[in-house]
Amino acid sequence: MRLRELRRLCRAQLLESRTARPEYCADLIISKKLGLDRASLLYKDCDIPEDVCEGIFFMIKKRASGVPLAYVLHEAEFFGYPFHVGRGVLIPRPETELLVEAALEYFPPGRAASFADWCTGSGCIAISLLLENSALTGAAVDISASALRWAAINRRAHGVEERLSLIRCGEPSLAPIEKNSLDFITANPPYIPEDEMAGLMSEVRCYEPHIALDGGADGLLLYRKFFSSFPALLKPGGLLFFETAGERQICSLERLASAEFSLVHKISDYNGIIRHVIWRKS
């Protein structure tokens, strides 16, 4: 089959299934499978072997059925780096890149520091920090064995195995991390209230792990544990970088925060929603 015909059929199938951005999805799947950049699809019209076409149509069918594109490709971009993802791990979000940017403002390249990334998932936050600042060392913590398997794959793919340890732990107070040893902690925990889970987009609700999304009755389950456990892990003056659901949740966090923490800064996402918050240990 010729490439142009393949593109037409793939786009038509995604359009028929009412998949969002059918042209973009089709071209991304085809370029990934063929090992070509998307731009080259505009002017190439070569013959594609039958077995390769079958593989592409299989991926298109998965996307048409509602499987998130990142899971179809087994890859998502975060902070300019490719990360392997699949069932059992949260897909990195663009707004979370702002959390990495904020941490790098306080710990720029060349400044040595030790950190932990809680609810690490694919490891995208921790690994991006390590790649941007070679003087950092970190620990990536998650309760999910499946998520940590993806984090291990990404740790190896980006060559940071010696600088990033992986820890499976569900209770922050029990984490095997030395007391007063961390310069900062990042966390993008599950923060969606459980009664709002049913209202999530079907691609999220049906495919992404609920353990990475459901924050309990009010969405604050893990934050309560963080505020009680993290003071023991941070050095004096150590920083917390949290992602949240927005301003209303941040107001609740301000009431939850212990006297050991002072609010430093709030950061808005690309839609103007206050999404991230920075705290300092007194």
Image (cartoon, rainbow, N blue to C red):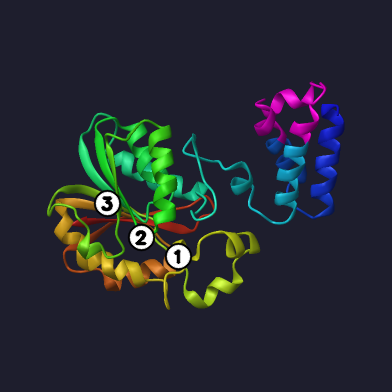
Q: Residue at x 75, y 52 (%)?
A: 64
Residue density around tag 2, few if under 14, some if 14–19, many if 20 or more, within 10 Å: some
Give the residue type at disc 1: Ile
Decide: is 272 above or below 72: below
The label on residue 82 is none
Foreground pick, 221 / 31: 31
Look at the image and give the residue range highlighted in magenta. 30-53
Task: Check disc 1 and report the residue beneath it.
Answer: 211
Residue density around tag 1, few if under 14, some if 14–19, many if 20 or more, within 10 Å: some
For the residues bearing labels 2 and 3, Cβ distance under 8 angstroms? no
Among the two numbered marks 2 and 1 on one chain, the one whose residue lies closer to the N terminus: 2
Residue 72 in magenta stretch? no
* Secondary structure type for disc 1: helix
Asked whether, in this view, residue 234 is left or right of residue 103, the answer is: left
Q: CA distance from mark 2 to mark 3?
A: 16 Å
Task: Check disc 3 and report the residue beneath it.
Answer: 185
Q: CA distance from mark 2 to mark 1?
A: 9 Å
Residue 47 in magenta stretch? yes
Task: Check disc 2 and report the residue beneath it.
Answer: 143
Quadrant in which the C terminus appears: bottom left
